[in-house]
Image: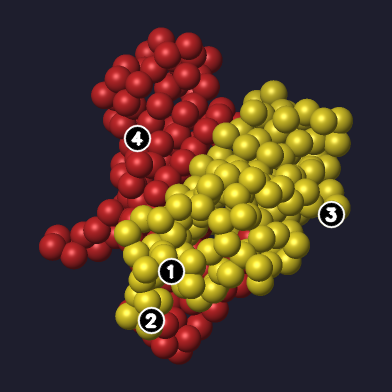
Amino acid sequence: MPLNRAFVGREYPASTTYEVGREHIRRFAEAIGDGNPAYRDPEAARALGHPDVIAPPTFLTVLNFRFASEGPIVDPELGLDYSRVVHGEQSFELHRPVRAGDVLHVVSRIVDIKDAGRNELISMAGEVTAADGEAVATLRSTIVSRGTAAGTAAGPEA
Amino acid sequence: MPSYDDVEVGTELPAQTFPISRLDLVRYCGASGDFNVIHWNERIAKAVGLPDVIAHGMCTMAVAVRVVTDWAGDPGAVVSYGVRFSRPVVVPDDDRGAVLRVTGTVEDKADGRVTVGLTAVVGEGDDAAKVLTHAKAVVRLP
């Protein structure tokens, strides 16, 4: 069944802030096998001109999962079947590096929903700001809802 | 750290090879908060039509950009990074896992920033497949 296009333009401000800690950054870096000292050692990060350890460029993906339960993905009125979802595209525009001690706020928005053959593409954007209102990053993603475009019978072969 | 003036369009970054094991995926589940079962449960991955457990696209994306951050020296120099996910990275339950081969080439430079185009491939010979397309990172260089 096609997605509810009335969701285009809707915004989802996160209900709470997200505190970035040194240990979470270290753990994320370990998970991607990255030994860069800027992710672990505050002195090494300061030597590069950062006030504290910084996070890898894709770290802010954690926000999507932290706040997934309050976003559109789980809203039954959007009509998204998560088992049909594939991640199509992702980008991060980093106005400055994310760093330990950041208290971040994110507002996510559904930018567009459109057909692409049998599939539908949902474009999302997230604006991430620091506690003082400083713009930190813009996240953009496209997720693919397989076989749900209007006029297609969404079956198991899709 | 490379300097902006020394980098030219066409400059190739040192290529790297990254193993991705089942343990790495479990670690990434915990670190990212993405516990989708297709990244750790072979039974369910196969039931939904995948050949085996697959890596998180975001994990592949994170690993691939190391070619850029290791080259730049300061990972905070990355001002933007984007990819399309073209193929899943299948991670077999063996001692090796998947092996991601990543290369990077400077495609553009302007205003103190260089754009690096990345290729990320898994598999050998006829089985080699690009798992990311349109993968580009923009880095600010001194």
Q: Which residue, given by chain and number where applicable, does mark 1 sit on?
A: A148
Q: Amino acid at mark 3?
A: Ser
Disc on res. A155: 2
Q: Amino acid at mark 4?
A: Gly
Answer yes or no: is residue B72 visible.
yes
Earlier-in-chain disc, 1 versus 2: 1
Q: Amino acid at mark 2?
A: Gly
**Tag 2 near tag 4, CB within 8 Å:** no
- In the image, taking residue A110 as reference, residue B47 lies left or right, namely left
Disc on res. B19: none
**Where does residue A88 sit, x and y in percent of width and height?**
43, 55
Q: Which residue, given by chain and number where applicable, does mark 3 sit on?
A: A15
Q: Which residue, given by chain and number where applicable, does mark 4 sit on?
A: B117
**Tag 3 near tag 1, CB within 8 Å:** no
Q: Nearer the viewer, mark 2 or mark 4?
A: 2
How far, Cα to Cα, is label 3 from label 1?
Answer: 30 Å
Give me the chain letter of mark 1. Answer: A
